[in-house]
Structures are given as structure tokens and as C-alpha cells.
């Protein structure tokens, strides 16, 4: 395990295929391996990915409902009807609204827009605003980023004479049959090839179709808005989303839109620093802050603003709102973390459902995301006010949180969202039931293994792979985001030379590491918590990100560490454990160790035949002492001059090694070398199978005995049943089996008792009356627990365990 406690998953890629792609693309092999990891397997796909262009965008006419929507809008423009754009209060909904407003204004439409208040109307369509639109003379309403599950409200609009065009990207849960047109790539029978557009992306497709219909140029000037909405909504930045954001960033960097220019100045963002990360973490939070902390209208006004002075005022107000949001968020996060720990201390909830009257519901979604990162499980946070709770839910990969809410829909007032994020409304009295309901759904649909945090390495780099050419080539992978994250690299076996704390709060670690004559100075942000775990001279594996940096006007190669894992050895009170688990050629390594050590070695192998295979390759003068799994039932006298134990195979049980550590091996100066791997556990399972009868095998054997006894055959246990088993049991297997049957009353003096069938009716509970079975069951469990420790634990934990045997 690593310093963070995460399990590292190293990549397994076809190096030959990567070399071919590297040669064809004339790019560094590491970049080729990254492309393969992202599913890009040939030069055609690679060029499309690395060089996104407008001609790669799909035709908007492929989207179901597009023709009907465009025709109705063009009719409204020709007839000078009043059109209202109904948006949402987040950055995606705001930018989608502005896209439609500007596109329709360009075509001469009479258009207005409406953004609901998070605090008054809440998310989605509501009847009161629709009635107001009608009373103010509107005849057509276009929703953006909402409305796909609002059949009742759309039907109401139809009743009062309002035509509705629904554009949305959320998961449809019902059919909106009363709308004039519905545009959503996720709706049934929609042939659009890409399904993961944001609300702003869908709005941009409608704007593109309108321009094409009106024989106007492609609306490239709206791509900055579409890019912001896409990046802010955390949809995958692949396929068409990647193209939208990439092209939109080019438009945004020109700062032709006064609103973006003013906002960049307010937050101190230079044009050259405008990236997908800046969109997601600097610009989007400021735009979102309006709707989170108050009303979304100022953000829309900023993006539509044509006056420089007014734009500066609006931008400054959004910046201040975002500062307030950050402070509020930190306060809520602290309280929510405490609540999460309390739930985890009293049980193991697969979904953390938290509620409070002290929380601002405008920021609980952000906090929920932070909790998911920390606890690696889905989180539902609820802000209570006057008996009503407004909730935000976030999830982990592989668990559909909207489906979980749908399963609990009878407890909710309303809900909607995606697989990874959702919003909902619930009454205070239903929160307890909701917590239980989400827990039941997660128990059935969320495997325990998914809750264990993992760190996925994209590409493994050697020391010589790390250079400026690679870092510069990585720029082609941008924009980064969900589905195309910044690459995480891994490098093995770096020696720790030194480290120091840096930063104004001394929370960051600056390290110096060496390998193959190369010295690097990576930084581990917030790594001070791991300070006591570092040991000079130890070899470690590094998980890190790469980027270009500057120091004193000099270009630098910056490594940002995400995790560290010890990779070689650990010492506990003089007992050293050297970790070579999974070594590619452990037989050759065992030979090297045995012949290279001054002290006599003890070699543990699962069987004598496996040990002999190694010994046959070793210099006769260095022949090791041999220990096998048979030591559990036999004796082993450890020679006095031995100090090295080589675990070539995975031991079955601690008792095997206990004999070594208690009979001569000086644990205060001994060395234990781990050479086994995960596959050894399969071999051990076969060994325990032939020695320790399981509940299932005991039932199988007695069923055969009962059948043959009825035919009045002679009762000879091994001969009677062994040929029916798919393994050959050992002698002690039959001794244990006969003892268990005798203790539960099935056998008496080798014969079946008269009440055998009655005893079998109480199977398997009857086994609890057999001390031999309970001993066998406990032995099986302890074997599995011991082996999992040796396979999964870090070297320092194994060293401490061995020392205390």
C-alpha cells in the first residue's frame, strides 16, 4: 500500500503497438502509450484527437426533434412572436441561455430570458413563471439545460397557450408529449452519435442549425460560451465535447466578449493562462457563484454586456460572491466531514446521506464532491429550511446516483441528474427513510471492492523518459477534464535522498530523489502529513504529474507528486523485509539471493518438488535449508548460522513461519525476502482443499455415503467417495472428515447412525456442534487472512507482523 493508503493500478499496454503508433505519429513513445490508454489505436484516431477542428463536429440535424424545433423558431421569428428562453442557475444553464439569446437576436427575433432562483423557484420548470410568460405576451418558450422530466408543467403550458421546445441533456425519466419539440441526445430513438453533451452543448447545436437554416455563417463566436458550459458541467471532455472546448478556448482567449475579459481581469487571469483547467476552476466557479449565493441573473448579464464599465462592475460582484462561496464552502465541509466520520464510526454506510439546517444549499454540491474524493463513496447532502430539504448527490465511477434516487422516488418531491451527479428535493420527515433506501440500493448495486480507493497510473516512465520533449507533447492532449484527465505517470525504484517542508504554512513536501544517475526535485502538495513515513535511502515508487515550470526566468521540469509507495524494503527492530513480490523471474532471483548472501539461507517453497527445482540451479556449496507447507504438521529445526529467509512461495499459515522465528532465526537481525505473487494463493487453495474439508465437500461426501449405504455397500470412506471428488484428498483430510462426522452423530465406530438422515435435515447448523469442524473452519479463515496480509500489506507492516510472531 502507498502513503495515502490507495491501491496502485499500473498500466498493462502493448508496448509493440505503442512503438508503432509512436513511429507513425513521430511522437514520444510515452505519448503513444497515453493515446492507447485513452482508446486511440491508430494514426487517424490520434490526429482527430490531437488536432480537433470544426469540421469534426456532427451535423445538428442528426438530433431527433431538431427540424421541428428550428421550424417553430423560424416561424416565431417571421411572425415577430415573443420567445422566452428558460434556463438554469448554474454555469451550464446560464451559458446555454446566453447562447440561445444571442443566436435568436442575431436572426432578428424578439427574445427574452428567464433564470430561476435557486432560493425561490428552485431547479426546473414551474407553473407560476410559465403563467407569467403568457401574461407578458410570450407564445413560445425554449428550455435549456432543463425540462426533460417536466411533463406536468409542459402540459400546463400547452393548456394556457404556450408552445414549448425542450432542450436538455439530463437523463429522461418520462416522455414530454405536450412539447412542440424535444431535443436531447439521450431521448429514445435519437440517432445523434454522441450522447454526453452539456446543456450549453445542446443549445449550441440548436443555434448552429438555426444559422444554417437562415443561411448565416457557422456561429463560432458562441463557442466560448459552449466551452464554459461544457467544462463547468463536468461532462466527459472527449469526442464532440473535446472539440467544443478546444475551439471555444481559442475564441475565449481573444477576450472579444467583454464579460469574459472583465471577469479575467477581476480574478487576475492572463489570456495565455486560459485553459480547460482555468475554465473549470477559475472562470466557472465565479459564474456559478451568482446562482449559488444569490441570483444567476448578474452572470447572464455579464456575458451579454456590451459596456466595458458595466461589465467590470458585474465581474467584480461575481468575484466577491465567489470569495464568499469559498468561505461558506469550507465551513460546511468541516461540519460535513465530522458527520461523515460519525456515520462511518457507527457502521459502514455505502452512501453517506447528511443533512443540516446550517448549510447553504447553493454550495452543498461542491462539498459533496469533496466528500466523495475523501471517503470514496457516494454522498447525498441535504440543506434543510422550514421542513424542506434541497439535496445534491455525487457519486463514484460505476454507481449511478440518479438511478439510486429513482429507486427512492416515492420519498422525493422531485429529482434529476446524471450518473455521477444529481439534485433532489425531500421533506425533512423522509430523510431517515431516504438514507435507509439509498443504503439498500447501494448494498445491492455497489460492490464493496468499489469503495476501496485506487490510484490508476496512465503510463509508467523510466528515468530517461522524463524530459522537456514529453512535457511539450502533452500539451496536445489538452483540454483536460472528465474522460481526459491530466496524465498520471508512475516511476519505480527512486531512492529518497532528502526532503524539506515548504510553503507559507509548511504543508508541502519538496523532495530530492535519484535513479540511474538522474536527480529530480518533485513537490508533494499537502504532503506534510506523510513526513514521519519518509526514510532516507529508501527506494520508492512515484505517482506524479508533469508540467513545464519557471524559476528565476529559467524553464524547469516540474513533477507534482500525487502519491508515494515504498518499493523495496522495511526494517522493524532489526528485522528487514525486502519486497520483491511479483518479481518477473523469481527462480533466477532466488538463485541470485541464495548464492549472494554470506549467511546460510532458508528457502520456503510450497512443496518439496518446487524447492528441488530451485536447489538444482544453485551452487552446491550454497544449498539452502528447505521449509515447506508440511511444517504445519511437522517439526523444523532452524540452523544457528542462518539469517535469511526467502519466501519463494506464499506460506499457507503463520504457524509455518512461527517455527522459523521461534527456533533459531534471530529476528533482531534477520532478513526476509518476499518473492511470491498473487497466483500463489490459487496453489494454496488447492493445498488447503486436499487437507481441510469445507462445508460444501462434507455435504457432498455424506450425500454419497447415504446413497451407497441404502444400497447396502460396504462403508469404506475414502474408497467410497474419493473417485467422485475432483481432487485427491490427503490422509489427514479423511481423518478430519471422519472425526467431524462422528462429533455431529453421523458416524459411530465407522458406521452410519440410524438418525443420520434426521441430522442431515439440520445441515449445516449441526456442524457447529463439532469442535473438529470449528477448528477446521477457523484454520481456513486464518489461512486466508494471513495470505491476504502477505499479499496486500506494505513491507513495513509485514516486518512488524513477522517480528511479533
Image (cartoon, rainbow, N blue to C red):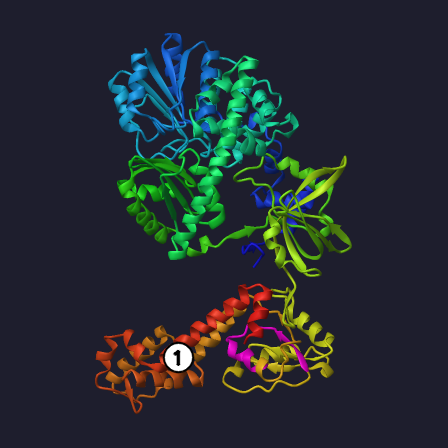
Q: Residue at x 45, y 56 (%)?
A: 449
Q: Quadrant of residue 666?
A: bottom right
- Element type where label 1 sits in the image: helix
Does the stretch in magenta take in 687? no
The part of the image, by quadrant, that contains residue 111 is top left
360 left or right of 522 in image: left
- Near mark 1 (Cα within 10 A), the count class, few <14, some 14-19 or many ≥20, is few
* Residue segment shown in magenta: 642-660
Percent coordinates x, y for residue 673 in the rendering: 64, 71
Q: Judge by depth and name the residue closer to the eye, 452 or 195.
A: 452
Quadrant, the C terminus: bottom right
- Left or right of residue 699, residue 524 in this image: right
Residue at 50% in and 73% down: 684
- For label 1, the residue is 775
The residue drawn where x is 38% and y is 14% is 83
* Residue 210 pos. (x, y %): 45, 17
**Front-most of residues 128 and 38:** 128
Q: Quadrant of the N terminus?
A: bottom right
Instruction: Point out residue 177 in the picture as x, y percentages from the top left corner.
Output: 29, 26
**Rendered location of residue 128, percent (x, y):** 29, 21
Instruction: Determine whether 616 is above or below 381 in the image.
Output: below
Asked whether residue 228 is in view, the answer is yes
Amino acid at each position: 500500500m502507498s502513503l495515502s493508503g490507495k491501491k496502485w493500478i499500473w498500466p498493462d499496454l502493448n508496448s509493440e503497438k505503442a512503438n508503432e503508433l509512436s513511429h507513425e505519429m513521430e511522437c514520444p513513445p510515452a505519448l503513444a502509450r497515453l493515446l492507447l490508454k485513452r482508446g486511440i489505436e491508430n494514426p487517424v484516431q490520434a490526429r482527430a484527437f490531437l488536432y480537433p477542428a470544426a469540421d469534426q463536429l456532427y451535423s445538428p440535424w442528426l438530433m431527433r426533434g431538431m427540424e421541428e424545433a428550428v421550424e417553430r423558431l423560424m416561424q416565431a421569428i417571421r411572425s415577430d412572436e415573443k420567445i422566452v428562453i428558460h434556463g438554469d442557475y448554474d454555469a451550464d444553464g446560464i451559458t446555454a441561455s446566453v447562447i440561445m439569446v444571442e443566436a435568436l437576436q442575431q436572426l432578428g427575433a424578439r427574445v427574452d430570458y428567464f433564470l430561476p432562483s435557486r432560493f425561490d423557484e428552485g431547479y426546473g420548470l414551474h407553473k407560476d413563471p410559465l403563467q407569467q410568460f403568457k401574461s407578458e405576451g410570450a407564445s413560445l418558450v425554449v428550455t435549456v439545460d432543463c425540462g426533460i422530466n417536466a411533463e406536468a408543467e409542459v402540459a400546463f403550458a400547452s393548456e394556457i397557450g404556450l408552445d414549448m421546445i425542450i432542450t436538455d441533456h439530463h437523463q429522461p425519466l418520462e416522455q414530454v408529449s405536450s412539447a412542440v419539440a424535444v431535443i436531447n441526445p439521450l431521448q429514445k430513438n435519437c440517432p445523434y452519435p454522441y450522447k454526453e453533451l452539456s446543456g450549453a452543448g445542446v443549445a449550441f447545436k440548436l443555434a448552429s442549425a438555426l444559422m444554417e437554416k437562415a443561411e448565416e455563417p457557422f456561429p463560432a463566436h458562441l463557442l466560448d460560451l459552449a466551452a464554459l458550459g461544457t467544462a463547468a458541467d463536468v461532462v466527459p471532455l472527449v469526442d464532440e465535447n473535446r472539440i467544443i472546448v478546444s475551439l471555444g478556448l481559442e475564441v475565449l482567449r481573444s477576450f472579444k466578449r467583454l464579460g469574459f475579459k472583465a471577469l479575467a481581469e477581476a480574478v487576475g487571469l492572463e489570456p495565455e493562462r486560459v485553459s480547460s483547467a482555468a475554465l473549470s476552476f477559475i472562470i466557472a466557479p465565479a459564474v456559478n457563484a451568482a446562482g449559488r449565493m444569490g441570483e444567476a441573473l448578474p452572470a447572464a448579464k455579464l456575458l451579454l454586456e456590451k459596456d466595458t464599465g458595466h461589465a467590470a462592475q458585474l465581474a467584480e460582484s461575481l468575484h466577491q460572491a465567489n470569495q464568499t462561496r469559498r468561505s461558506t464552502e469550507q465551513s460546511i465541509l468541516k461540519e460535513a466531514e465530522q458527520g461523515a466520520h460519525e456515520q462511518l464510526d457507527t457502521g459502514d454506510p455505502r452512501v453517506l446521506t447528511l443533512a443540516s439546517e446550517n448549510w447553504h444549499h447553493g454550495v452543498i454540491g461542491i462539498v459533496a464532491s469533496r466528500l466523495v474524493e475523501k471517503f470514496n463513496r457516494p454522498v447525498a447532502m441535504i440543506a434543510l429550511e422550514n421542513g424542506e430539504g434541497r439535496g445534491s448527490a455525487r457519486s463514484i465511477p460505476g454507481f449511478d446516483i440518479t438511478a439510486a434516487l429513482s429507486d427512492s422516488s416515492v420519498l422525493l418531491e422531485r429529482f434529476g441528474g446524471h450518473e455521477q451527479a444529481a439534485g433532489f428535493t425531500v421533506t425533512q420527515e423522509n430523510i431517515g427513510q431516504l438514507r435507509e433506501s439509498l443504503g439498500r440500493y447501494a448494498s445491492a448495486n455497489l460492490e464493496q471492492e468499489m469503495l476501496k480507493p485506487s490510484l490508476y497510473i496512465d503510463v509508467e516512465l523510466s528515468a530517461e523518459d522524463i524530459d522537456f520533449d514529453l512535457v511539450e507533447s502533452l500539451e496536445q492532449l489538452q483540454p483536460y477534464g472528465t474522460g481526459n484527465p491530466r496524465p498520471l505517470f508512475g516511476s519505480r525504484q527512486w531512492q529518497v535522498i532528502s526532503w524539506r517542508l515548504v510553503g507559507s504554512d509548511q504543508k508541502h513536501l519538496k523532495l530530492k530523489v535519484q535513479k540511474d544517475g538522474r536527480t529530480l526535485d518533485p513537490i508533494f502538495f499537502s504532503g506534510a502529513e506523510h513526513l514521519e513515513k519518509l526514510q532516507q535511502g529508501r527506494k520508492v515508487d512515484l505517482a506524479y504529474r508533469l508540467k513545464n515550470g519557471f524559476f528565476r526566468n529559467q524553464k524547469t521540469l516540474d513533477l507534482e507528486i500525487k502519491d508515494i509507495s515504498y518499493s523495496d524494503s522495511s526494517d522493524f527492530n532489526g528485522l528487514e523485509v525486502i519486497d520483491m513480490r511479483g518479481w518477473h523471474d523469481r527462480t533466477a532471483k532466488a538463485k541470485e539471493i541464495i548464492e549472494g548472501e554470506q549467511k546460510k539461507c532458508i528457502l520456503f517453497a510450497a512443496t518439496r518438488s518446487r524447492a528441488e527445482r530451485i536447489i538444482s540451479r544453485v551452487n552446491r556449496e550454497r544449498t539452502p535449508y528447505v521449509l515447506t507447507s508440511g511444517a504445519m504438521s511437522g517439526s523444523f529445526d532452524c540452523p544457528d548460522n542462518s539469517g535469511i529467509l526467502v519466501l519463494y512461495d506464499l506460506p499457507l499459515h503463520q504457524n509455518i513461519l512461527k517455527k522459523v522465528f521461534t527456533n533459531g532465526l534471530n529476528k533482531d537481525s534477520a532478513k526476509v525476502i518476499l518473492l511470491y505473487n498473487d497466483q500463489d494463493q490459487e496453489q494454496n487453495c488447492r493445498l488447503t482443499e486436499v487437507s481441510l474439508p469445507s462445508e460444501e465437500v462434507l455435504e457432498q461426501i455424506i450425500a454419497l455415503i447415504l446413497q451407497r449405504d441404502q444400497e447396502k455397500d460396504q462403508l469404506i470412506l475414502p474408497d467410497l467417495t474419493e473417485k467422485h471428488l475432483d481432487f485427491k484428498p490427503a490422509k489427514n483430510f479423511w481423518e478430519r472428515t471422519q472425526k467431524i462426522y462422528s462429533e455431529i452423530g453421523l458416524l459411530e465406530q465407522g458406521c452410519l447412525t440410524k438418525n443420520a438422515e434426521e441430522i442431515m435435515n439440520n445441515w449445516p447448523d449441526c456442524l457447529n456442534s463439532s469442535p473438529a469442524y470449528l477448528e477446521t473452519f477457523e484454520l481456513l479463515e486464518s489461512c486466508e487472512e494471513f495470505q491476504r496480509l502477505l499479499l496486500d500489506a506494505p513491507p513495513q507492516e509485514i516486518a512488524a507482523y513477522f517480528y511479533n510472531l
